[in-house]
Amino acid sequence: MSTPLSGRKAQAARNDEVILAAARTVFMRSADAPIAAVAQEAGVGVSALYRRYASKEDLLVTLCTDGLRRFIDVAQRAALLPDPWDAFATFVEGVIEEDTHSLTVHLAGTFTPTPELRELALQAGDLGDAIIDRARTAGAVREDLVDEDVSMIFEQVTAVRVDDPERTRVLRARYVALLLDAVRPGARTGTLPGPGPTGAELGARWVPR
């Protein structure tokens, strides 16, 4: 059983959650936004924000690290399901529900990844690929579905965003359902046009601009 945080530490943790939530909002609007915009969104002074994050790059790294950890948690839980299709569908739905993929891709190339971030990215990729490979081997998804196709599905669905968060959630669930039908072996589409994206194509976006 974990020890409850002291009053001061609990307040600091709450402040950090507010700052990170504000940073997600601000940087989804514009990855080039200044750190002062995050402070304004969070309702804190710029000096208070800099006491927690030495630079904008530190804040961006923290956001992406948090997103990858959430992705890993979703993948690990999905992998425990005995049915390959259930594991695959739960993985896809869970990553989109966490809404981490859109931000991490949006921030790609805006900072230099740390060794920890690279390690988490490799772990996340391995977990996701294992779930997809398992579903493909079991015949639960179409055989021409490549691992990178799923990354593009994440991007397409998380691009759906309206002013109302609940409406956004419902719309995303609608398109996840449609796309999950499209990756089943019995989908009406025959041979897919052109090859799927490659790891090199998707990874190139992480080269700092």
Image (tube, rainbow, N blue to C red):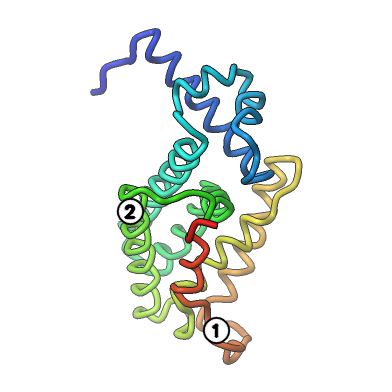
Dot 1 or dot 2: first in sequence order is: 2
Tell me: residue 116, above or below residue 18.
Answer: below
Identified by mark 1, the residue type is Gly
Disc marking residue 186: 1
Percent coordinates x, y for residue 182 in the rendering: 59, 76
Percent coordinates x, y for residue 97 in the rendering: 54, 49
The furthest residue to the right:
163
Q: Nearer the viewer, residue 62 or 47?
A: 47
Q: Is residue 33 visible?
A: yes
Q: Quadrant of the N terminus?
A: top left
Point 47% across, 77% down: residue: 198
Mark 1 vs mark 2: in front: 2
Identified by mark 2, the residue type is Gln
User: In the image, 14: left or right of 122?
Assistant: right
The furthest residue to the front:
209
Point 40% across, 15% down: residue: 10
Q: Nearer the viewer, residue 68 or 117?
A: 117
Q: Nearer the viewer, residue 122 or 39?
A: 39
The furthest residue to the left:
1
Disc marking residue 76: 2
Residue 62 is drawn in which quadrant? Answer: top left
The furthest residue to the bottom:
191
Dot 1, how many residues are within 10 Å of its Cα: few (below 14), some (14-19), or many (20+)? Answer: few
Point 49% across, 49% down: residue: 111
Disc marking residue 169: none
Residue 81 is drawn in which quadrant? Answer: bottom left
